[in-house]
Amino acid sequence: MRFTQHRPFEGVIRSATVSTTKTGKFFISILVDQDEEKWIPAENKIGIDLGLEHFAVMTNDAMVSEKVDNPRFLRKSEAKIKKAQRALSRKKIGSKNREKAKLILAKRHEKIANQRKDFLHKLSRRIVDENQVIVVETLKSKDMMKDHKVAKSIGDVSWHEFVRQLEYKSNFYRRTFIKADPWFASTQICSSCGEKGQKKAMDVREWTCTHCSVHHDREINASINLLMLAN
Ligand SMILES: [Zn+2]
Protein backbone atom coordinates (compact mmCIF):
# COMPACT_ATOMS: atom_id res chain seq x y z
CA MET A 1 0.00 0.00 0.00
CA ARG A 2 1.22 3.49 -0.81
CA PHE A 3 1.67 5.98 2.00
CA THR A 4 3.18 9.36 2.87
CA GLN A 5 5.92 9.40 5.46
CA HIS A 6 5.99 12.63 7.43
CA ARG A 7 9.28 12.13 9.19
CA PRO A 8 12.23 9.84 8.56
CA PHE A 9 13.32 7.76 11.53
CA GLU A 10 16.13 5.54 12.67
CA GLY A 11 16.05 2.78 15.23
CA VAL A 12 14.31 -0.52 15.82
CA ILE A 13 10.58 -0.67 15.16
CA ARG A 14 8.76 -1.84 18.29
CA SER A 15 5.14 -1.53 17.23
CA ALA A 16 2.84 -0.03 14.64
CA THR A 17 -0.67 1.28 15.22
CA VAL A 18 -3.17 1.86 12.45
CA SER A 19 -6.01 4.27 13.03
CA THR A 20 -8.74 5.84 10.93
CA THR A 21 -10.43 9.21 11.23
CA LYS A 22 -14.15 9.92 10.80
CA THR A 23 -13.43 11.17 7.31
CA GLY A 24 -11.88 7.86 6.30
CA LYS A 25 -8.20 8.73 6.42
CA PHE A 26 -5.79 6.07 7.61
CA PHE A 27 -2.82 6.78 9.83
CA ILE A 28 -0.03 4.51 10.93
CA SER A 29 2.05 5.43 13.98
CA ILE A 30 5.35 3.64 14.38
CA LEU A 31 7.06 3.33 17.74
CA VAL A 32 10.83 2.99 17.51
CA ASP A 33 13.65 2.45 19.98
CA GLN A 34 16.30 5.08 19.36
CA ASP A 35 19.55 6.14 20.94
CA GLU A 36 19.10 9.23 23.02
CA GLU A 37 19.06 12.51 21.17
CA LYS A 38 22.30 14.46 21.47
CA TRP A 39 21.93 17.36 23.83
CA ILE A 40 22.39 20.63 21.97
CA PRO A 41 22.52 23.37 24.58
CA ALA A 42 20.75 26.60 23.73
CA GLU A 43 21.92 30.00 24.85
CA ASN A 44 18.84 31.87 25.87
CA LYS A 45 16.34 32.06 28.65
CA ILE A 46 12.77 33.10 27.94
CA GLY A 47 9.66 34.23 29.80
CA ILE A 48 6.31 33.58 28.10
CA ASP A 49 3.09 35.40 28.91
CA LEU A 50 -0.02 33.78 27.49
CA GLY A 51 -2.92 36.02 26.67
CA LEU A 52 -5.98 36.88 24.71
CA GLU A 53 -4.77 39.96 22.92
CA HIS A 54 -1.88 37.89 21.62
CA PHE A 55 -1.46 34.14 21.88
CA ALA A 56 1.95 34.57 23.50
CA VAL A 57 4.25 37.43 24.33
CA MET A 58 7.82 36.42 25.03
CA THR A 59 10.97 38.17 26.20
CA ASN A 60 14.38 36.54 26.27
CA ASP A 61 17.47 37.41 28.30
CA ALA A 62 18.84 39.53 25.45
CA MET A 63 15.72 41.60 26.21
CA VAL A 64 14.26 40.86 22.80
CA SER A 65 10.46 40.69 22.93
CA GLU A 66 8.17 39.00 20.47
CA LYS A 67 4.39 39.05 20.19
CA VAL A 68 2.79 36.01 18.60
CA ASP A 69 -0.67 36.69 17.23
CA ASN A 70 -3.67 34.52 17.79
CA PRO A 71 -4.09 32.41 14.70
CA ARG A 72 -6.96 34.01 12.84
CA PHE A 73 -7.36 31.04 10.53
CA LEU A 74 -8.92 29.19 13.43
CA ARG A 75 -11.72 31.75 13.49
CA LYS A 76 -12.27 31.29 9.79
CA SER A 77 -12.40 27.53 10.15
CA GLU A 78 -14.84 27.94 12.99
CA ALA A 79 -17.19 29.92 10.77
CA LYS A 80 -17.04 27.11 8.23
CA ILE A 81 -17.90 24.60 10.94
CA LYS A 82 -20.99 26.59 11.89
CA LYS A 83 -22.08 26.69 8.27
CA ALA A 84 -21.61 22.94 7.94
CA GLN A 85 -23.61 22.41 11.14
CA ARG A 86 -26.50 24.45 9.82
CA ALA A 87 -26.43 22.56 6.54
CA LEU A 88 -26.55 19.27 8.41
CA SER A 89 -29.50 20.33 10.56
CA ARG A 90 -31.56 21.03 7.45
CA LYS A 91 -31.11 17.53 6.00
CA LYS A 92 -33.69 14.81 6.53
CA ILE A 93 -32.78 12.13 9.04
CA GLY A 94 -31.77 8.92 7.29
CA SER A 95 -31.22 10.60 3.93
CA LYS A 96 -28.13 10.27 1.76
CA ASN A 97 -27.68 14.03 1.81
CA ARG A 98 -27.57 13.94 5.57
CA GLU A 99 -24.70 11.45 5.45
CA LYS A 100 -22.88 13.71 3.01
CA ALA A 101 -23.41 16.74 5.23
CA LYS A 102 -22.11 14.76 8.21
CA LEU A 103 -18.93 13.92 6.38
CA ILE A 104 -18.38 17.56 5.43
CA LEU A 105 -18.79 18.60 9.05
CA ALA A 106 -16.32 15.93 10.19
CA LYS A 107 -13.82 17.16 7.59
CA ARG A 108 -14.13 20.72 8.85
CA HIS A 109 -13.52 19.59 12.42
CA GLU A 110 -10.52 17.58 11.35
CA LYS A 111 -9.06 20.55 9.51
CA ILE A 112 -9.36 22.94 12.42
CA ALA A 113 -7.82 20.37 14.79
CA ASN A 114 -4.89 19.90 12.41
CA GLN A 115 -4.38 23.62 11.94
CA ARG A 116 -4.33 24.14 15.68
CA LYS A 117 -1.89 21.30 16.27
CA ASP A 118 0.39 22.53 13.52
CA PHE A 119 0.49 26.04 14.91
CA LEU A 120 1.23 24.88 18.46
CA HIS A 121 3.87 22.34 17.44
CA LYS A 122 5.81 24.80 15.31
CA LEU A 123 5.82 27.46 17.98
CA SER A 124 6.70 25.16 20.87
CA ARG A 125 9.47 23.52 18.87
CA ARG A 126 11.02 26.86 17.96
CA ILE A 127 10.97 28.02 21.59
CA VAL A 128 12.60 24.81 22.78
CA ASP A 129 15.22 25.00 20.03
CA GLU A 130 16.23 28.52 20.94
CA ASN A 131 16.10 28.52 24.72
CA GLN A 132 17.71 26.56 27.53
CA VAL A 133 15.41 27.88 30.26
CA ILE A 134 11.71 28.39 29.59
CA VAL A 135 9.33 30.03 32.05
CA VAL A 136 5.56 30.11 31.58
CA GLU A 137 2.81 31.37 33.80
CA THR A 138 0.44 28.97 35.45
CA LEU A 139 -2.86 29.35 33.68
CA LYS A 140 -5.64 31.05 35.52
CA SER A 141 -8.22 30.42 32.85
CA LYS A 142 -11.00 29.78 35.37
CA ASP A 143 -11.19 33.47 36.23
CA MET A 144 -11.44 34.31 32.59
CA MET A 145 -13.98 31.63 31.77
CA LYS A 146 -16.66 33.67 33.55
CA ASP A 147 -16.80 35.77 30.43
CA HIS A 148 -18.24 33.58 27.73
CA LYS A 149 -16.65 35.36 24.78
CA VAL A 150 -13.29 35.16 26.41
CA ALA A 151 -13.76 31.47 27.11
CA LYS A 152 -14.34 30.87 23.43
CA SER A 153 -11.07 32.54 22.58
CA ILE A 154 -9.29 30.44 25.15
CA GLY A 155 -10.64 27.33 23.49
CA ASP A 156 -9.22 28.68 20.26
CA VAL A 157 -5.78 29.42 21.45
CA SER A 158 -5.29 26.15 23.29
CA TRP A 159 -3.03 27.30 26.06
CA HIS A 160 -3.14 24.02 27.89
CA GLU A 161 -2.04 22.05 24.89
CA PHE A 162 0.73 24.55 24.26
CA VAL A 163 2.08 24.30 27.81
CA ARG A 164 1.86 20.51 27.61
CA GLN A 165 3.93 20.50 24.40
CA LEU A 166 6.48 22.91 25.83
CA GLU A 167 6.87 20.69 28.87
CA TYR A 168 7.42 17.39 27.11
CA LYS A 169 9.67 18.93 24.46
CA SER A 170 11.69 20.62 27.20
CA ASN A 171 12.14 17.26 28.90
CA PHE A 172 13.13 15.60 25.66
CA TYR A 173 15.72 18.23 24.73
CA ARG A 174 16.91 18.67 28.32
CA ARG A 175 15.72 22.20 28.82
CA THR A 176 14.78 23.63 32.17
CA PHE A 177 11.03 24.17 32.21
CA ILE A 178 9.57 26.38 34.93
CA LYS A 179 5.92 27.00 35.67
CA ALA A 180 5.45 30.15 37.70
CA ASP A 181 3.67 29.86 41.01
CA PRO A 182 -0.10 30.40 40.47
CA TRP A 183 0.04 33.37 42.82
CA PHE A 184 2.93 35.02 41.03
CA ALA A 185 1.56 38.44 40.02
CA SER A 186 3.31 38.69 36.65
CA THR A 187 0.92 41.42 35.49
CA GLN A 188 0.92 43.49 38.67
CA ILE A 189 4.64 43.69 39.36
CA CYS A 190 6.66 46.47 37.74
CA SER A 191 9.57 44.77 35.96
CA SER A 192 11.68 47.92 36.30
CA CYS A 193 11.55 48.55 40.05
CA GLY A 194 9.81 45.47 41.42
CA GLU A 195 6.96 47.38 43.03
CA LYS A 196 3.75 45.37 43.15
CA GLY A 197 0.94 47.60 41.92
CA GLN A 198 -2.81 47.06 41.98
CA LYS A 199 -4.69 44.46 39.92
CA LYS A 200 -5.13 45.44 36.32
CA ALA A 201 -8.46 44.93 34.54
CA MET A 202 -8.23 42.77 31.44
CA ASP A 203 -8.69 45.70 29.09
CA VAL A 204 -5.72 47.63 30.50
CA ARG A 205 -3.08 47.19 27.79
CA GLU A 206 -0.54 49.74 29.07
CA TRP A 207 0.16 51.29 32.43
CA THR A 208 2.62 53.51 34.26
CA CYS A 209 4.26 52.44 37.50
CA THR A 210 3.26 54.80 40.31
CA HIS A 211 6.56 54.11 42.05
CA CYS A 212 9.20 54.58 39.32
CA SER A 213 7.06 56.13 36.55
CA VAL A 214 8.19 53.63 33.91
CA HIS A 215 5.52 53.06 31.26
CA HIS A 216 4.77 49.41 30.51
CA ASP A 217 3.16 47.31 27.84
CA ARG A 218 1.04 44.90 29.90
CA GLU A 219 2.14 41.72 28.15
CA ILE A 220 5.81 42.54 27.69
CA ASN A 221 6.09 43.55 31.34
CA ALA A 222 4.52 40.23 32.37
CA SER A 223 6.91 38.25 30.17
CA ILE A 224 9.91 40.07 31.69
CA ASN A 225 8.69 39.22 35.18
CA LEU A 226 8.40 35.58 34.15
CA LEU A 227 11.88 35.69 32.59
CA MET A 228 13.28 36.85 35.93
CA LEU A 229 12.15 33.54 37.47
CA ALA A 230 14.66 31.82 35.19
CA ASN A 231 17.59 33.03 37.26
ZN1 LIG B 1 8.25 50.66 38.83
Image (tube, rainbow, N blue to C red):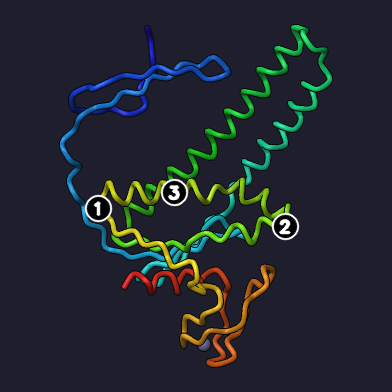
The residue under the point 62% across, 77% down is: 199
Pick the residue in front: 230 or 5. 230
The residue under the point 18% across, 24% down is: 12
- Graded by Cα atoms within 10 Å as few (under 14), some (14 to 19) or many (20 or more), the crowding at tag 3 reads some
Question: According to the image, label 3 marks what residue?
Answer: 123
Q: Is residue 81 left or right of residue 40?
A: right
Pick the residue in front: 12 or 184. 184
Q: Amino acid at mark 3?
A: Leu
86 shown above or below 20: below
Closest to the camera, between mark 3 and mark 1, is 1
Q: Amino acid at mark 1?
A: Arg
Q: Are marks 3 and 1 in contact (CB under 8 Å)?
A: no
Closest to the camera, between mark 2 and mark 3, is 2
Query: CA gap, disc 2 to disc 3?
Result: 27 Å
Tally of numbered discs: 3
Q: Are marks 2 and 1 in contact (CB under 8 Å)?
A: no
Quadrant the C terminus occupies: bottom left
Pick the residue in front: 145 or 87. 145
Query: CA gap, disc 2 to disc 1?
Result: 38 Å
| Mark seen at residue 174 | 1
Q: Are marks 2 and 3 in contact (CB under 8 Å)?
A: no
Where's residue 229, x and y in %? 37, 72
Q: Secondary structure at mark 1?
A: loop
Where's residue 92, x and y in %? 82, 12
Q: Is residue 21 left or right of residue 37?
A: right
89 shown above or below 152: above
41 shown above or below 219: above
